[in-house]
Amino acid sequence: MYDMPFLVSSLYKFLCLSALEVNHGI
């Protein structure tokens, strides 16, 4: 249960970074 917040945060950060990279690429 303690790892859940960190996991979600990491996933959200990765998603945001991916979206930013895609936007920059295009």
Image: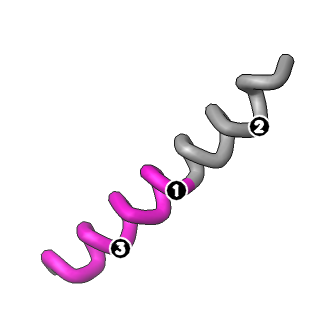
Q: Kindly report which numbered mark, 2 or 3, lies closer to the viewer in this rendering.
A: 2
Spatial CA span between label 2 and label 3: 22 Å
Q: Which residue is mark 3?
A: 20
| Badge 3 element | helix
Dot 3 crowding, Cα within 10 Å, few <14, some 14–19, many 20+:
few
Residue 24 picture location, percent across and down: 22, 82
The residue range painted magenta reads 13-25
- Dot 2 or dot 1: first in sequence order is 2
Query: Which mark identifies residue 13?
Result: 1
Q: Is residue 7 left or right of residue 17?
A: right
The residue closer to the viewer here, 17 or 19, is 17
Is residue 14 inside the magenta stretch? yes
Residue 22 picture location, percent across and down: 25, 68
Q: Please, which residue is most extreme toward the left here?
A: 25
Spatial CA span between label 2 and label 1: 12 Å
Q: Is residue 18 left or right of residue 6?
A: left
